[in-house]
Amino acid sequence: MSDTPSNDYPEDKPYRRPHRATGKKAPGGARPGAGRPEGTANALPLGYVQALKGLRHRVPEGTPEALADVAGVALDRLVDVMLERVEDPQLAAQVLKASTLIRAEVCGPPAQKHEVTGKDGQGLSINIDLTATKE
């Protein structure tokens, strides 16, 4: 028996530090068959998710007409990219980014919806009495 630790690693593989607790091969790393299979089609074409995020923004009432027009043009450009009217993929990515940023700046963040229900799933009723005084 020798004092040197045994090497359980194949000679053709690069050296990996042994696990500190067991002294054997470290956990984790790539596994055969893991991950997305090659050739799998995307669920949505490239850029659709970003375009959909840009479409959520709505121009608020009271926005100056010039800014509302810019937001409208940005919306039109988002639709152009989604309908594949922009041929060059690099240009489409730049148009998506710029249009989304313009819509976010002009329109502000999308409204958040909060729904509150009671124990039985019915809506809650809250009464606030402002006439009561604290003594």
Image (spheres, grey):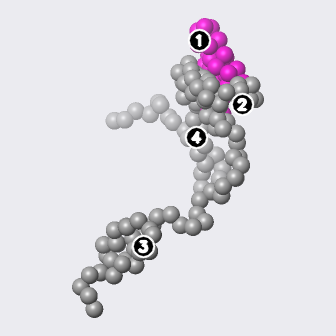
Residue 134 image position (x, y, % from top left): 37, 35
Which of the two residues, 97 or 121, is positioned nearer the viewer here?
97
User: What quarter of the picture does the C terminus occupy?
Assistant: top left
Spatial separation of the CA atoms under disc 4 and disc 1: 29 Å
The residue singled out by tag 3 in the image is 11
The reply to whether residue 96 is in sight is no
The residue singled out by tag 4 in the image is 114
Answer above or below: position of 58 versus 123. above
Looking at numbered disc 3 in the image, what kind of residue is underneath it?
Answer: Glu
Residue drawn at 45 percent across, 69 percent down: 12
Give the extent of the magenta segment: 52-80
The residue singled out by tag 2 in the image is 82
Name the outermost residue toward the left: 3
Drawn side of residue 101 relative to residue 134, left or right:
right
**SS of the residue under disc 4:** loop
Q: Nearer the viewer, mark 4 or mark 1?
A: 1
**SS of the residue under disc 1:** helix
The local crowd at label 1, few if under 14, some if 14 to 19, many if 20 or more residues have their Cα within 10 Å, is some
Drawn side of residue 84 relative to residue 115, left or right:
right
The reply to whether residue 83 is in sight is yes
Residue 39 on the magenta segment: no
